[in-house]
Image: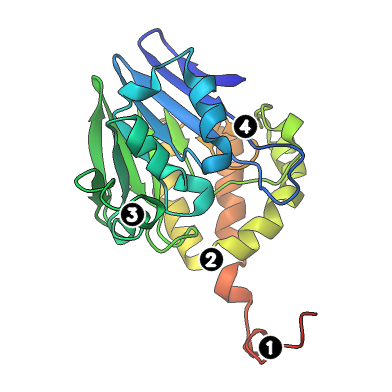
Amino acid sequence: MAISLYDDGSHRCLMFADLVDDDDDHAVQANQFLLVSGREGALIDPAGNMTYNALIMAMASYFPARELKYILASHADPDIVASLNKWLISTQCTLVVSKLWSRFVPHFCTAGNAAGRILGVPDEGGWFKLGEERVAAVPAHFLHAEGNFHFYDPRSRILFSGDMGASMVAHELVAEPVSTVAEFTRLIPSMEGFHRRYMVANKVCRLWADMVRPMVERGEILMMVPQHGRYMVGKSVLLAFLDWISALSCGIDRFDSGHYRMPAELA
């Protein structure tokens, strides 16, 4: 089932949250996103092979997959873009991904399939056209990947935030937006472990939050939608998240010599 995040008749943002098999205990829940502006469409973080067929079917009612202009990949993890080869075969789309990953993602593909079809984004990010609108690849490096981008759609005022803001919640809760500070506070236990391990350091969390905060305060970002778990709506909730992540000790901040020693037997 598609969740409509924004629809003004000519510009739509849809979220697919239930395409990972609930019975697969080893697969993390993942959200996929479809942006449609006029006659052009883009998929954000379409995930791996286990979601490909279901995503093709789910998006068919909203946009013909064969006409996709872009696949936007926040980074190059398998749950982001391992299905790349299938998309390149079935469509004429271009992959937009960090320049750091542009020579690695072809390893997901049959030899030659990715040739001339990858737009490598420099570290500073950039804007590109989708229909009559523009979408931004916004720097989010080391959150958690070395080359990492979030995608900002100014028409809908949505920031698609990749792993930033992810929560590990039951599948049936993902469709429910977090719209009050009290709800956000209750969500923190399902976010904390993930962010402490997957975000590289508090320094980059603060740098990212300092970039995003003025946009939230000016009303340029009304919604933050991560790749895992529930999405956040409204200025008060987004500012509460930015305050929380800015203060979080994470990644290498929490490591010491005890984490680097020869291991015991696994089995």
**Distance from Cα at disc 3 to Cα at disc 2:** 32 Å
- The residue under label 1 is 258
Q: Earlier in the sequence, mark 3 or mark 1?
A: 3
Q: Residues within 10 Å of mark 2 (few under 14, many from 20)?
A: many
Does label 4 or label 1 sit earlier along the sequence? 4
Question: Alpha carbon of mark 2 to alpha carbon of mark 4: how far?
Answer: 32 Å
Q: Are marks 3 and 2 in contact (CB under 8 Å)?
A: no
Report if residue 155 is visible in the image: no
Instruction: Measure the alpha-carbon separation of dots 3 and 1.
Output: 37 Å
Closer to us: mark 3 or mark 1?
3
Q: Secondary structure at mark 3?
A: helix
**Pointer 2: what residue?**
202
Which of the pair 253/181 is nearer the observer?
A: 253
* Mark sitting on residue 19: 4
Contact, mark 3 vs mark 1 (Cβ under 8 Å): no
Amino acid found under the numbered disc labelled 4: Leu
